[in-house]
Image (cartoon, rainbow, N blue to C red):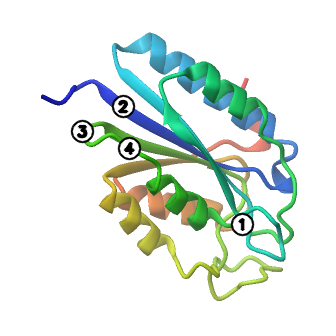
Amino acid sequence: MPNVNEVDLAFVVDTTSSMHTLINDAKKYIKQVLEATSEAADIDLRVGIVQYRDHPPEDSMLTDSSALTKDLDVVQKYVNGMRARGGGDGPEAVFDGLIAATKLKWRKHAMRLAILLGDAPPHGYGWGGDRWPEGCPCGENAESTAAHLEGANIIMYSIGLNEYPNLAKSFGEMSSLTGGQFFELSNQRAIS
């Protein structure tokens, strides 16, 4: 019989250079969610992290992931090691990060949640200087990425850490399509 209190949670985090002033806010947010979740309810929690940056030649790292684990010390160590670097143009490989999250080893009967943390929209959302203005080189878009998440039974919530053009539109669209929600935290309202 499946354990009804199983929750698998993946944080999908932009770690490009534009996040330099925001990466500590993202780390604090992750820590706060983990503390609140572990204190608030009797749940069997596993957590994983997916970092994303951008496609070559903008960056040499596309994604990097840690496995879903119950060991929150392992999660915190991985989070502490995240650094903002690379990225190149403004938009990032958001879709690739979310697709990488669907490939984690999720438990069959767990409630599956993903929290996207970033400050820039995906490619193809009309932001000047986009190396790929017609869309992400991976071939995904908001609808297809949301379909991958839905196919993996993952509800996505997203946190916009900046007010860049089309961030709310792209993050919000994907969140809504999976049954989740978008929240905006600007530099002026940094996480305390």
Q: Which residue does the image show at 55% across and 17% down from the upper left?
A: 35
Going by the numbered disc 2, the residue's amino acid type is: Val
* The N terminus - image quarter: top left
Residue 104: % across, % down: 47, 49
Going by the numbered disc 3, the residue's amino acid type is: His
Disc 2: which residue: 7
Q: Which residue does the image show at 55% across and 23% down from the upper left?
A: 34
Query: Going from the N terminus, do you reach mark 4 or mark 1 first?
Result: 1
Query: Going from the N terminus, do you reach mark 2 or mark 1 first?
Result: 2
Q: Nearer the viewer, residue 157 or 87?
A: 87
Going by the numbered disc 1, the residue's amino acid type is: Glu
For the image, the number of numbered tags is 4
Q: Nearer the viewer, residue 84 or 163?
A: 84
Distance (Cα) linking label 2 and label 4? 9 Å
Disc 1: which residue: 92
Q: Given this view, does label 3 or label 1 mark the residue nearer the observer?
A: 3
Relative side of 160 to 83, left or right: left
Residue lying furthest left: 1
Residue 136: % across, % down: 63, 79
Going by the numbered disc 4, the residue's amino acid type is: Trp
In contact (CB < 8 Å): disc 2 and disc 1: no
Query: Going from the N terminus, do you reach mark 2 or mark 3 first?
Result: 2
Instruction: Identify whether 55 is placed above or below 160.
Output: below
Relative side of 88 to 93, left or right: right
Disc 3: which residue: 109
Res. 106 mark: 4
SS of the residue at dot 2? strand
Instruction: Identify whether 134 is placed above or below 54.
Output: below
Query: Going from the N terminus, do you reach mark 3 or mark 1 first?
Result: 1
Residue 158: % across, % down: 54, 49
Distance (Cα) linking label 3 and label 1? 32 Å
